[in-house]
Image (cartoon, rainbow, N blue to C red):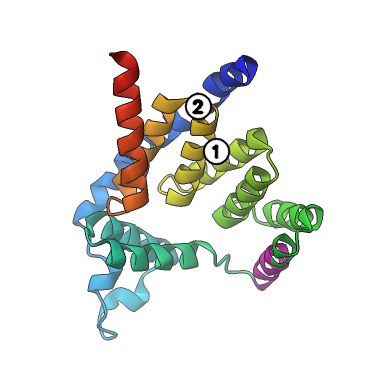
Amino acid sequence: MPAMRVFALSYLALPILLVLSAAAPHVAMADEPSVVERKDPGDSSGSLSPRQQLDNLFTALKRQRDPDQASLIADQINTQLGDSGSATINLLMQWADKAIQEKRNAAAMDYLDQVISLKPDFVDGWNRRATLNYAIGDYRKSMEDIDQVLRIEPRHFGALAGMAAILTEHGNDELALKAWERFLEVYPANRSAQDEAGKLSEKIAGSRT
């Protein structure tokens, strides 16, 4: 499908470049203390804002080299990203999840559309809709949603993995590799990402010889 590949190269390059350009501000936080290192309830961690807590978790994830411990940190990040701070939004997300499980995709899409309309800065609304669009085969809309996720949170490793998957399926190996490399900057201990990046590197090197 050559036409699809041309579309992918032109349209999907923008979010990749966005992700790479957004990397620098977050690297600067590498020396900050991490949430997992600040467990004393008497310290000042309780006064941290949700954003500061999230930043510290991402710092801890970047430092952690043990895959199992990193997975626990990643779970904490996903939990925090999944809490909108709004009972209404959280309920709509629960309804969307239930609809997806029951394969009522149209209803799920409607719930997620409502979430995004009510709280456009809620990253998990965009990410969940990106996942649903991917599942139903609408890669263009999925990538549009991924782009929004990464505008809000450039370190969103789930969205980066989704981007890499779409790029790979469209034969854009070099862009997919860049997405995995960005993923590994955020989440270096993820073995699946390491494997995917390694396979793509070998494939690209082999095609050049």
Q: Please, is residue 79 above or below residue 134 in the view?
A: below
Q: Residue at x 54, y 32 (%)?
A: 169
In percent of width and height, residue 93 lies at: 67, 64
Chief secondary structure of the magenta portion: helix
Q: Which residue is mark 2?
A: 14
Magenta highlight on residue 94: yes
CB-based contact (under 8 Å), mark 1 and mark 2: yes
Q: Residues within 10 Å of mark 2 (few under 14, many from 20)?
A: few
Q: Which residue is mark 1?
A: 147
Q: Secondary structure at mark 1?
A: helix
Q: Residue at x 49, y 32 (%)?
A: 168
Which of the 4 image quarters holds residue 204?
Answer: top left
Which of the 4 image quarters holds residue 148?
Answer: top right
Q: Which mark is residue 60?
A: none
The residue type indicated by label 1 comes to Asp
Count of picture labels: 2
| Residue 21 seen | no
| Residue 102 seen | yes
Quarter of the figure with the N terminus: top right
Question: What span is colored magenta in the figure?
Answer: 87-97
Quarter of the figure with the C terminus: top left
Q: Please, is residue 142 above or below residue 156 in the view?
A: above
Q: Please, is residue 149 above or below residue 203 in the view?
A: below
Earlier-in-chain disc, 1 versus 2: 2
In percent of width and height, residue 81 lies at: 50, 61
In percent of width and height, residue 184 lies at: 31, 45
89 horizontally vs 179: left or right: right
Q: Secondary structure at mark 2?
A: helix
Q: Please, is residue 23 above or below residue 170 in the view?
A: below
Of the pair 4 and 127, the residue shown nearer to us: 4
Q: Residues within 10 Å of mark 1 (few under 14, many from 20)?
A: many
